[in-house]
Image (spheres, rainbow, N blue to C red):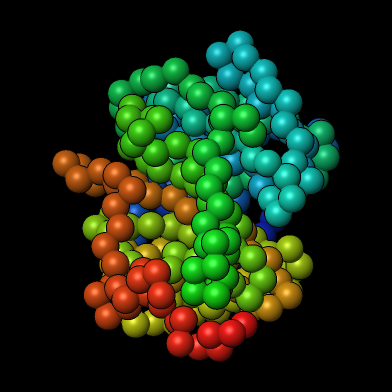
Amino acid sequence: MAYMNKNAELKNGYNAYIDSSVDDMGTQMDVGLLLMEAGDTYVYEDAKKEVAILLFSGSVTYEWDGKKVEADRPDCFHHDAYCLLAGCGTKVTITAKAHSELYIQATVNETPYEAVMYTPDKVQVEHKGFGGELMGCMSREIKTFFDLDNAPFSKMVLGEVLNLPGKWSSYPPHHHPQPEVYFYRFDYPDGFGAGFANGEIFKTQHNGCAVINHGFHSQTAAPGYAMCYAWGIRHLEGDPWDKTRIDDPEHAWLWKADANDHIYPNH
């Protein structure tokens, strides 16, 4: 597991967090944050790589293959998402209409396919933990832009989790063979939380990035601070991530319907 926090180093333009040609830490993906100001243009085109470009915040125009989509998202805490998934060889142009921040994830996939724009009406959204499980401590919103079900042509998976203040997500602790990347956003720049991976604990911060290449993992946000993180997975050859979840047997009892009923039973 590795954790990177680059707030002090971020600059306008593309900021690389993971470069798969140098050291991908098992992710097999490039990961970066694109910062743009009004009038800026960014072009992505790679003959061998597919790319996902997710708007965290701002106002941009996506253009590819003669198509154009206007995307506005003031923030990722109260507004729905836009994410473009484009196959190798596709020229994608992003033009900013205001200060904008976008998450970029790419991997080698030399089989071309037609780009797909996941607009708010196409994003899969689940609300988990609001039914009283574990006294509401796992209340969270899970967005899935694309996975094996709706994008079998891609070698990647990408989604977002809205971790409510003081709550937990990726919980109970679990793991899967496929390495995973988390990219964190907080509703306040000084917000923070904690991540757990393979026995290690790390402090999560705004624009921090965690690579979990093995072991059980889970995380929490500090009270008062909402945490939204992109979660990205690269399918392993012959072993794609198919909503794969292997729970930590030590904590499997937490799935029982009466878990924690012995704590303040009248409250």
**Residue 72: percent from the left, percent from the top?**
76, 36
Q: Position of residue 208 (x, y in %)?
A: 57, 66
Residue 185: quarter of image: bottom right
| Horizontal relation, residue 256 to residue 45: left or right | left
Residue for point 27% across, 80% down: 250
Percent x, y of residue 62 = 66, 26
Which residue is depicted at the point 44% across and 18% down?
114
Residue 187 placement: quadrant: bottom right
Residue 55 in view of the camera: yes
- Looking at the image, the residue that sits furthest to the front is 266
**Compared to 260, does 150 lie above or below?**
above
* 252 vs 82, nearest the viewer: 252
Q: Compared to 97, does 66 lie above or below?
A: above
Q: Quadrant of the N terminus?
A: bottom left
* Image x and y of residue 154, in percent: 36, 32
Residue at the spot 60% in from the left edge and 57% down from the top edge:
162
The residue located at (74%, 68%) in the rendering is 189
Apparent side of residue 200 relative to residue 225 in the rendered image (left or right): left
Q: Return the residue nearer the eye: 164 or 69.
A: 164
Residue 21, visible in the rendered structure:
no
Does residue 227 appear to the left or right of 21 in the view shown?
Answer: right
Q: Nearer the viewer, residue 104 or 148?
A: 148
Quick check: 149 above or below 21? above
- Which of the image's four quarters has the C terminus? bottom right
